[in-house]
Amino acid sequence: MGRTIPSFRLALEMEEREWTPFRNALDKKDRKKFDDMFDIPRLYTSACSYAVQPIRLYPILMSILLHCYKQLVDCISQVRQMMVVVGIEEEEEKEEEALPLP
């Protein structure tokens, strides 16, 4: 029979354990950030479970990337709102729209 893929929650725990030597080599302040980063996939457990990837790091990384991308888009939106409040010229906004970010 084929290999059984563990539940995502178990896979995440296993993956996190495998990264323990890397985590322990980090500075204390970076360990906290590393732990926070590994908490992000827990926000997307359902999506990661449905992905059914045999390489368990893939959905973990995709959920972290998605979360960071959403935060980046929110920051860009906030900056644009601030620019409107401050009254930045439209030409400057057009230059920024040339960037590949939304």
Image (cartoon, rainbow, N blue to C red):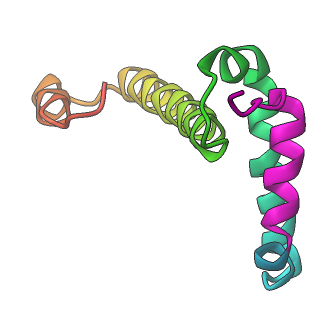
Asked where in the image residue 77 lies, by quadrant, the reply is: top left
| Up/down of 33 relative to 49, above or below | below
| Up/down of 55 relative to 30, above or below | above
Q: Position of residue 7 (x, y in %)?
A: 84, 26
Asked where in the image residue 17 lies, by quadrant, the reply is: bottom right
| Up/down of 67 relative to 56, above or below | above
Asked where in the image residue 51 lies, by quadrant, the reply is: top right
Q: Position of residue 21 (x, y in %)?
A: 82, 78
Answer with left or right where residue 79 lies relative to residue 15.
left
Query: At 19% from the left edge and 37% from the top edge, which residue is drawn?
Result: 99
Of 66 and 99, nearer the camera is 66
Query: At 67% from the left edge and 41% from the top edge, which residue is drawn?
Result: 56
| Up/down of 21 relative to 7, above or below | below
- Magenta stretch: residue 85 in it? no
Q: Position of residue 22 (x, y in %)?
A: 76, 77
Answer with left or right where residue 61 lies relative to residue 31.
left
Question: Which region is colored magenta?
Answer: 1-20
Which quarter of the rendering shows the N terminus? top right
Of 31 and 23, nearer the camera is 23
Of 76 and 69, nearer the camera is 69
Query: At 66% from the left edge and 40% from the top edge, which residue is drawn?
Result: 60
Majority SS type along the magenta span:
helix
- Magenta stretch: residue 11 in it? yes
Of 82 and 30, nearer the camera is 30
Query: At 87% from the left edge and 80% from the top edge, which residue is drawn?
Result: 24
Which quarter of the rendering shows the C terminus? top left
